[in-house]
Image: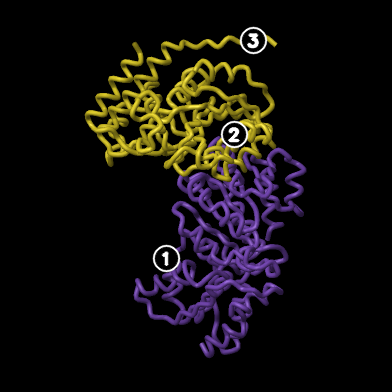
Chain colours: A purple, B yellow
């Protein structure tokens, strides 16, 4: 995902000289290094200093440039939180804050590197739009949208590298602010955002053996959420499965349940999220998800026969 | 090197600054909290920047130099100068801190002449660094002026920004420190002695520095004109919080409080007396 992001950014930067990249001591691997080589003055490394990364991005935006601030999600969002709130969001400046390694991607690095509350934190700030694409192709579309918009700040949550492509020819195109059906079914809707949506496909395979068909939906725009799209999803599927690599509160799961309650829509809603805890376990990404109870077998066990 | 003689009318500046202070006191009679003293400590600095240093009077989105009020709580000093320049309408200052108006006790981006929303301390220098670097990328000669309080230099973010300004060799960044020695509580020189010497800290961070009386416009302008280039420039302006009114000077309560009627009359009399 990060390579697709960097490649997309680099291509756009050739045409728009206002695009700048500000990083905080993160090695510019792959395509990002290509951008750095071609436009050294538009690539700024503030060092291990995230407050100035955001402050500079805001100042450059005030003077008419289009900066992206880029580092590991916890350091992109948590360390300079008040700078994002006051400098970017209060002033409604079109700066994109890119968080790499959303969720528990950095599975061997401990909870200092786990952006497990980032969506809740980001969604709480007025004016901040929140995007979390599920695969490299969606990352490309989301990045292009961030590049082309000038309305205000965005938090763009990405994974790391090597994520599989989840969409296919049958999938909807990416439209900002709209749910994206990666596949359509009649009985069960599996909805989520980010690379963990891969688990949705695995889940759908098992469910299909029971004669049920599944919609798999990427809610890449978490804020503003596609309210009409969520209501329609609730009305047209008997079972909803929400898979979210984020803490249980303040994210997509809450929004869906609240909407179902407000609209008085009777359908079965099962949510699978990270737990409200820090882990002290190190291993693969799947190991950490598993330690939070976010594993395919748990989803299947919980939903049983749909 | 030839010595530049600053063109600066000291008497005219004194008259302007008394009128600015009187206008702030007048507005103070309509609101309970106004940050009178932190505005009074930086009147001469703001006046100098707008009257003598900036090429364009800081109007948002215009091409030209920019001024950023990092010590947002001192914004009355900026408001009254912007009013005198015709950038902020008088009616808006009269509606200060009321639901009918647009001006609050901290600067709000989008208001006439206000380029950034400040109020939370330790933000302005980072913004100014980004603004100055943007002008470098755009290959303009525009300068970014910023006014910081000494208190907000206690924020670590100010030093992240100070380092980055030097790393990027931002010689188009000029900052004034309103060194009135007071935070909201007491004298920093008594409670936070490791803060000093301040000038050495900037020097060691790769800045060009000067230290002057912050109520002496001529001295500040002189330092500005003779500064060396190729590095960001800081003028540490030694000031008196509440300057110009005897009972306000260096008395912490006036960080927030507005004067009552009698205090107001005495303050105006002192300011007018100071001109004679």
Gap in Å between the C-alphas at discs 2 and 1?
57 Å
**Residue sitting nearer the eye, A140 or B131:** B131
Q: Residue at x 64, y 35 (%)?
A: B201
Q: Which residue is drawn at 50% across and 63% down?
A: A120
For residue A18, side relative to residue A256 (left or right):
right
**Residue sitting nearer the eye, B34 or A273:** B34
Is the residue marked by circle 1 packed among few (<14), some (14-19), or many (20+) residues within 10 Å?
A: few
- Picture coordinates of residue A100, whole percent (x, y): 65, 59
Q: Nearer the viewer, mark 1 or mark 3?
A: 3
Is the residue marked by circle 2 packed among few (<14), some (14-19), or many (20+) residues within 10 Å?
A: some
Q: Mark 3 lies on which chain?
A: B
Question: Which mark identifies residue B198?
Answer: 2
- Picture coordinates of residue A3, whole percent (x, y): 71, 57
Gap in Å between the C-alphas at discs 1 and 3?
70 Å
Give the SS element for disc 2: helix
Q: Which chain carries label 2?
A: B
């Amino acid at each position: 995902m990060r390579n697709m992001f960097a490649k997309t950014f680099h291509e756009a930067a050739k045409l728009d000289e206002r695009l700048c990249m500000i990083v905080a001591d993160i090695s510019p691997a792959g395509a990002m290094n290509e951008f750095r080589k071609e436009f050294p003055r538009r690539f700024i490394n503030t060092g291990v200093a995230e407050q100035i990364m955001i402050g500079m991005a805001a100042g450059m935006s005030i003077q008419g440039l289009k900066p992206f601030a880029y580092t590991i999600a916890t350091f992109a969002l948590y360390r300079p939180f008040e700078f994002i709130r006051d400098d970017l969001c209060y002033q409604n400046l079109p700066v994109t804050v890119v968080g790499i390694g959303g969720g528990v991607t950095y599975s061997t690095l401990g909870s200092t590197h786990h952006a497990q509350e980032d969506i809740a934190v980001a969604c709480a700030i007025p004016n901040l739009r929140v995007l979390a694409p599920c695969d490299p192709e969606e990352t490309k579309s989301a990045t292009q949208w961030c590049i082309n918009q000038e309305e205000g700040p965005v938090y763009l949550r990405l994974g790391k590298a090597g994520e599989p492509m989840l969409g296919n020819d049958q999938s909807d195109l990416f439209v900002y602010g709209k749910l994206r059906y990666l596949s359509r079914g009649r009985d069960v809707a599996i909805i989520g955002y980010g690379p963990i949506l891969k688990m949705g496909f695995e889940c759908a395979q098992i469910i299909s053996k029971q004669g049920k068909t599944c919609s798999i939906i990427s809610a890449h725009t978490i804020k503003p959420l596609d309210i009409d799209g969520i209501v329609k999803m609730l009305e047209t599927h008997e079972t909803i499965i929400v898979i979210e690599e984020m803490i249980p509160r303040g994210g997509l799961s809450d929004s869906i349940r609240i909407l179902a309650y407000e609209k008085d829509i009777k359908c079965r809603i099962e949510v699978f999220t990270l737990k409200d805890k820090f882990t002290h376990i190190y291993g693969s990404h799947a190991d950490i998800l598993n330690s939070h109870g976010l594993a395919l077998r748990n989803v299947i066990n919980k939903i049983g026969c749909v | 090197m030839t010595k530049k003689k600053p063109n600066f009318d000291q008497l005219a500046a004194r008259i302007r600054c008394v009128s600015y202070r009187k206008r702030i006191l007048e507005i103070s009679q309509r609101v309970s909290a106004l940050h009178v003293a932190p505005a009074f400590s930086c009147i001469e600095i703001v006046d100098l920047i707008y009257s003598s240093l900036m090429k364009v009077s800081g109007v948002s989105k215009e091409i030209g130099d920019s001024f950023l009020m990092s010590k947002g709580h001192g914004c009355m000093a900026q408001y009254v100068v912007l009013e005198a320049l015709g950038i902020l309408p008088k009616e808006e200052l009269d509606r200060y801190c009321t639901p009918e108006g647009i001006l609050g006790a901290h600067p709000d981006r989008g208001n006439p002449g206000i380029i950034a929303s400040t109020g939370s301390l330790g933000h302005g220098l980072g913004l100014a660094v980004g603004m100055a670097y943007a002008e470098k990328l755009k290959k303009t000669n525009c300068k970014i002026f910023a006014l910081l309080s000494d208190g907000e230099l206690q924020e670590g973010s100010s030093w992240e920004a100070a380092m980055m300004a030097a790393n990027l060799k931002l010689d188009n960044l000029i900052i004034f420190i309103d060194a009135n020695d007071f935070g909201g509580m007491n004298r920093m020189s008594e409670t936070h002695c490791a803060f000093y010497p301040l000038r050495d800290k900037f020097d060691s961070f790769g800045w060009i520095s000067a230290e002057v009386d912050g109520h002496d416009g001529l001295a500040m302008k002189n330092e500005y004109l003779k500064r060396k280039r190729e590095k960001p420039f800081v003028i540490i302006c030694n000031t008196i919080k509440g300057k110009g009114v005897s009972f306000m000077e260096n008395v912490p309560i006036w960080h927030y409080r507005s004067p009552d009627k009698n205090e107001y009359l005495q303050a105006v009399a002192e300011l007018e007396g100071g001109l004679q």
